[in-house]
Every structure is written in C-alpha cells, then in structure tokens.
Amino acid sequence: MKTHIISCETIKQEVEKAMLQTGCEYPVSWIESGLHNVPDKLRGKLQETLDCLDAGRVLLVMGYCGNSVLGLETRNFELIIPRADDCITLMLGSLDARKKHDRTYFLTKGWLEGERNIYEEYKYTVAKYGLEQGKEIMNMMLEHYEYLGIINTGVGGFDELCEQAKKIADDLGLSIKTIEATDMWINKALTGPWEDGEFHIIPCNTVIEHGHLS
C-alpha cells in the first residue's frame, strides 16, 4: 500500500533516526513546529497536507497536540494516529512513563530550536518588562513546575543540550534532571503493528470526532 508520513519538525531528528533503524523509506511531510502553539492553525495545516497526498495510508507520527487532530477528514486513505496526547508522551513511550515525572517541564533539542520555545518566551518577557518583573511573570507561568526535564533521545548532541539547559533552568528557577527517551513507539508508528491499545486507525472518508480517539 502506498504510504506517506506526516510528522512535526520538532521531532524531525528522532523520526529520521527511527526511519534509519527500521529501514523505513516512506516520503515525509514535515509540519512547522510553531503551529503547536495554535491548535486551529495546526489542524488547518494538517488538513491542507492531507488533501495534497496521493496515498492509501498516512502515518501521523505525532501526538494529538491540543486536540488538533479533531475535525480532520480522511480522503481515500486510512490514517494511523498514536494514542499520545503530544510528542513528549510519544518519546517517553507511554502516558504512565510521563506521569512518573510530576511537575516537570520537558525539553529536547528540537523544542529548544523551535521558534517559540519557553526560553525564547522568557527572554521576550524580560526584554519587555525588565528583569525583575519579567521573572515574576515567568514564575507565575511556571508555578506548577519544579523541574526542567532534559530528554535524551539519542540525537542532537545531548551534552551540548545539557550545558544550555543549565543556564535555562537557572534563569527559570527550576531544578534540572535528565530523562531517557525510548524509540519503541515511534519505530512502531513507522512499521506497525498498529495495535488498538497504542494507535487509532481512522478509515477512509471519515471526519475525526472524540469517539474515534476514545
């Protein structure tokens, strides 16, 4: 079956690593990372991308991302979606694995390189309001977080990321910890089997509703 992948630029290195590991050679459409901050725009871009594809199966290698997959319409293809709320859960392997890291703001190299990451938000806020007020605003935004969790996905220069993260954690008033990712779920998203407990299989000519994601 002719197959196409759609994934997010934020996890591009992780997906490309998985493709090498699995021997997957399907074509990929990359979605701009900053769209995750605006689910309606992300949904629009996803639908636009889907509408341009000539495939019998599409692998959406990313999470729900603010329920941006709701309302998407398949055409003459089935759509495979991981049962993951976002790409962090996808890289950690399960929601249970994510829940082990309470009060943690997660960071990877891909997120740090994104145009609207938390540190860029911090620098913007400090530049606009001054250091003291800017820090107060960020403390309010991050009041439910205690840790900056640096995810080691095996790509992107982890030692360099850790050095950058030390500065970020200090400025944001968070403690730093490292977390090991797993390739398991992303690899399976590329190759199957797409078991019901881990993936949704959306049939052709279907508008995705809440019931499809339960």
Image: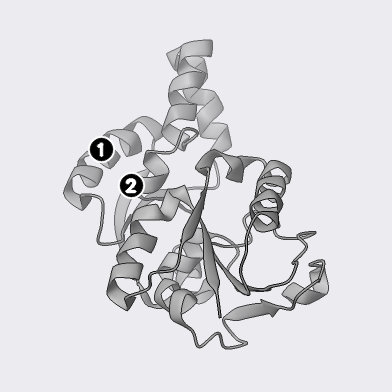
Whether residue 102 appears in this view of the structure is no
At label 2, the amino acid type is Lys
Above or below for 111 versus 205: above
Locate the N terminus by quadrant.
bottom right
- Rounded to the nearest angstrom, the CA distance separating label 1 from label 2 is 10 Å
Label 2 environment density (alpha carbons within 10 Å; few <14, some 14–19, many ≥20): many
Tell whether 74 sits left or right of 85. Answer: right
Instruction: Say which of marks 1 and 2 sits in front.
Output: 2
The residue where tag 2 is placed is 109
Tell whether 53 sits left or right of 212. Answer: left
Above or below for 46 versus 127: below
* Residue 102, horizontal then vertical, whole percent: 48, 61
SS for callout 1: helix
SS for callout 2: helix
Asked where in the image residue 26 lies, by quadrant, the reply is bottom left
Q: Which numbered disc covers residue 132?
A: none
* Residue 138, horizontal then vertical, whole percent: 51, 30
* Residue 10, horizontal then vertical, whole percent: 44, 49
Residue drawn at (31%, 48%) of the image:
176
Tell whether 138 sits left or right of 37. Answer: left
Taking the view exactly as shown, the residue that stands out farthest to the left is 159
- The reply to whether discs 1 and 2 touch (Cβ–Cβ < 8 Å) is no
The residue where tag 1 is placed is 164
Label 1 environment density (alpha carbons within 10 Å; few <14, some 14–19, many ≥20): few
Residue drawn at (69%, 41%) of the image:
41
At label 1, the amino acid type is Gln
Residue drawn at (77%, 75%) of the image:
212
Q: Nearer the viewer, residue 54 or 153?
A: 54
Q: Nearer the viewer, residue 125 or 156?
A: 156
Asked where in the image residue 143 lies, by quadrant, the reply is top right
Locate the C terminus by quadrant.
bottom right
Q: How many marks?
A: 2
